Amino acid sequence: MTRIILALLFAASVACVAGGQEAKPPSGGREADAGTKGGWRVERSKDKDGKVTEVTRDERGNILIRTHNVGTPQEAIWLYTYSSTSQLMSEEAPDGTRALYDYETPDSQTPKRVKVISPDGKETIVTPKPPVVPPEDSRR
């Protein structure tokens, strides 16, 4: 539980900048009842083995924190940040690997490049391929 609260505080302290505007998560980072933490919506699910996954979303529905194996020694937390236009700006995996996303325009949802930083500091640049749009069905 402490790791989740720390993750919320971490996410609350991050401000993403895009197009000159700041997107800040709600203040607080405190726990609350009724499926919210610090103003964010929390969803919990349990798999067939009884392991709990918790997903914390902001008011726009963006995933801020994803926690697998909640409350166990195998608990793993992923952290995500977004721009004011809901572009994924960064994510951090449980092992400390970080991915930083760069976009062509403030409204683009496909990044033009991703910088992946391993826990040992090694950087790799990845250029994602745009999604393939299937051709129109010519049988119509």
Image (cartoon, helix red, strand yellow):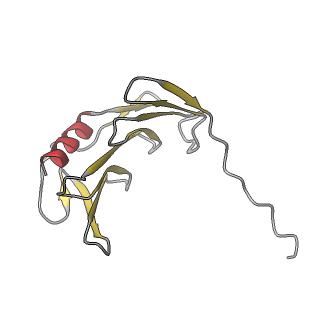
Which residue is painted at 87% across and 75% down in the image? 139
- Hey, which quadrant is residue 46 in on the image? bottom left
State the residue in front, 103 or 127: 127
Please give left or right for residue 127 compared with residue 47 in the image.
Answer: right
Please give left or right for residue 131 compared with residue 37 in the image.
Answer: right
Q: How many marks?
A: 0
Q: Quadrant of the C terminus?
A: bottom right
Q: Position of residue 15 (x, y in %)?
A: 32, 33
Q: Position of residue 85 (x, y in %)?
A: 45, 42
Please give left or right for residue 79 compared with residue 124 in the image.
Answer: left
State the residue in front, 10 or 138: 10
Which residue is painted at 42% across and 30% down in the image? 118
Q: Is residue 69 above or below residue 17?
A: below
Q: Is residue 48 above or below residue 20?
A: below
Which residue is painted at 15% across and 66% down in the image? 34
Q: Position of residue 73 (x, y in %)?
A: 19, 52
Please give left or right for residue 110 compared with residue 136 in the image.
Answer: left
Q: Position of residue 24 (x, y in %)?
A: 30, 38
Which residue is painted at 38% across and 52% down in the image? 62
State the residue in front, 2 or 12: 2
